[in-house]
Structures are given as C-alpha cells and as structure tokens.
C-alpha cells in the first residue's frame, strides 16, 4: 500500500517543520513525516527548510551562522493563530516525539557542498542511533553526492534521490549514484513507465508534494511507494 508521508509535518494544519506539525501528522495517522535539516554554527541539527530563518521565523540570518540558542530563540509560528512562540525544533526533539510511534522519518539533508559539506552526515547518523530510530529513517537530498557519501559509509543506510525536472532513465541513474529510491516532483511522473522501470529494479518511488485530490488519486493508481503531502488526512481519505 502507498505510504502517506506528511511533508514538513502536516504543514496544512500547523507551521511547517515544528513539533505541532509532527503531532498533527501523528493525529492524521500518517505513515511517516518528511522534514528538512540544517546545521547551526555550533553543530546542532535543526529542522528548518530554508538556509535562512527569515521566511519561517521572526528573525533574520543564515542558520549556519547562528548558534542553537539563537535559532531556538525565534518564533516559528509564521503568524498562524494558536502557535505563537513555537520554536524551530532540533532533530533530537523530533525523534524524542516520534520514537514511540511507528512513523517513519524522511530526513532531507539541505546542507550543500559549499558550506558544511558532509559535516551533517555523522550528526544525523549519531542521532538516529541515539534515539533508536534505525530502520525507521531514510535520507533524501537534492545533493546526490551527499547520498553517495551516505551509502559509502554504510550500504544499510536508505537513500532517495530528490529531483524536480525529468531525468532520462532515472532508474539507471539511481543505480549509478547509488540510491534505494527516487523522490521526484510528482509532475514528472505523468509517465507511468518511471514507476514500472524503478520497481523492476527494486527502486522505491516517493513523489512530492502531492496535495490535490486528483493528483493523489493518480499517484495511488500508479502504485507509488509513498506520497509526500502537506495534507495526510486528505491523502488517507482518498487512499
Ligand atoms: O522531500 C520532498 C520535498 O520536501 C523536496 O522539496 O523544497 O519541499 O524540501 P522541498
Ligand atoms: Mg523537504
């Protein structure tokens, strides 16, 4: 059955990438959550989408130039009523919430090759171990060198290639990186051949960000392995 993964938590119901959004994902009975991580200047893994705090908080500046204390001093409610004062969580805080559930976690590594590079890798692997999340976590990135590096550390680590534009024979590319899954923008999956070819090679297909009823229906018909969606409750109703 196609898994339902709450994108940045249930981000239709609470501010993205906050503990409230992950609690909403549990309430909506999602199968998992997707979240984005960056490193602070003092080496903590924090859950935030952008390189900078400006869009999602009342602060300003690059995450990798701020300390954890500075990042967690900000309000991440994005002006949404009922969430005033909510913080940017650490990955550790999210794992503490999710470790007693069955939900999987798709950790999207946002660090790029230009600052911090692969420095986030040992940190996330350590947190996975520390919180007993092994077997429930898989990693994705638009930086496919990061995915290659993860696989180099251990073949057991599950990885997925993020991409937004059509890639020719992406199943061959996934084997070359190598990676266990492809995570395409759902709009490049209009050709069902991608799912068929990937599945023939044992490569999982998890499109994002599928929010509209007819698009969710199409993805379920194509038998993708997971849909990454802002609205896990809607996805469940359709599934
Ligand atoms: O991981 C799927 C999706 O989150 C990738 O794009 O920009 O929402 O992180 P973005
Ligand atoms: Mg993401």
Image (cartoon, rainbow, N blue to C red):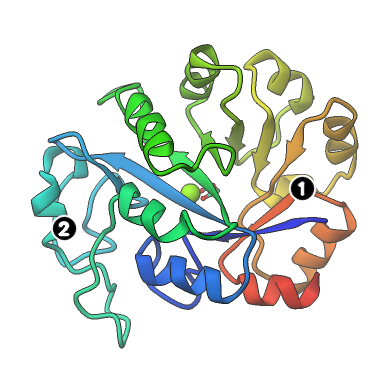
Q: Earlier in the sequence, mark 1 or mark 2?
A: 2
The residue that label 1 is drawn on is 225
Residue situated in front as seen by the camera: 186 or 85: 85
Instruction: Determine whether 159 is above or below 50 in the image.
Output: above
Q: Position of residue 144 (x, y in %)?
A: 53, 24
Q: Quadrant of the N terminus?
A: bottom right
Q: Position of residue 116 (x, y in %)?
A: 26, 25
Residue situated in front as seen by the camera: 136 or 54: 136
Badge 2 crowding class, 10 Å Cα cut-off, few under 14, some 14 to 19, many 20 or more, is: some
- What residue is at 19 percent from the left and 38 percent from the top? 64
Q: Quadrant of the C terminus?
A: bottom right
Q: Is mark 1 within 8 Å of ligand 1?
A: no
The residue that label 2 is drawn on is 72
Dot 2 falls on a residue whose secondary structure is: helix
- What residue is at 45 percent from the left and 71 percent from the top? 23
| Residue 32 marker | none
- What residue is at 35 percent from the left and 64 percent from the top? 18
Horizontal relation, residue 172 to residue 233: left or right: right
Dot 1 falls on a residue whose secondary structure is: loop
Q: Can the viewer see residue 47 in this picture?
A: no
């Amino acid at each position: 059955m196609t898994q339902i993964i709450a994108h940045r938590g249930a981000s239709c119901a609470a501010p993205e990438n906050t503990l409230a959004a992950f609690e909403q994902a549990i309430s909506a009975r999602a199968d998992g959550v997707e979240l984005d991580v960056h490193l602070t200047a003092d080496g903590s893994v924090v859950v935030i989408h952008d390189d900078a705090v400006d869009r999602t908080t009342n602060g300003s500046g690059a995450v990798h130039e701020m300390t954890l204390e500075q990042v967690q001093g900000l309000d991440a409610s994005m002006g949404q009523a009922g969430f005033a004062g909510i913080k940017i969580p650490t990955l550790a805080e999210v794992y503490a919430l999710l470790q007693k559930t069955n939900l999987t976690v798709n950790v999207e590594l946002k660090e790029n090759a230009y600052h911090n590079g692969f420095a986030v890798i040992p940190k996330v692997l350590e947190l996975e171990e520390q919180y007993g999340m092994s077997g429930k976590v898989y990693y994705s990135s638009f930086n496919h060198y990061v995915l290659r590096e993860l696989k180099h550390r251990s073949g057991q680590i599950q990885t997925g290639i993020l991409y937004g534009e059509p890639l020719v024979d992406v199943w061959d590319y996934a084997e070359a990186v190598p990676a266990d899954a492809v995570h395409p923008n759902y709009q490049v999956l209009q050709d069902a051949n991608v799912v068929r070819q990937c599945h023939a090679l044992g490569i999982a297909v998890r499109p994002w960000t599928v929010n509209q009823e007819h698009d969710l229906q199409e993805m379920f018909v194509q038998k993708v392995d997971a849909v990454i969606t802002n609205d896990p409750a809607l996805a469940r109703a359709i599934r």
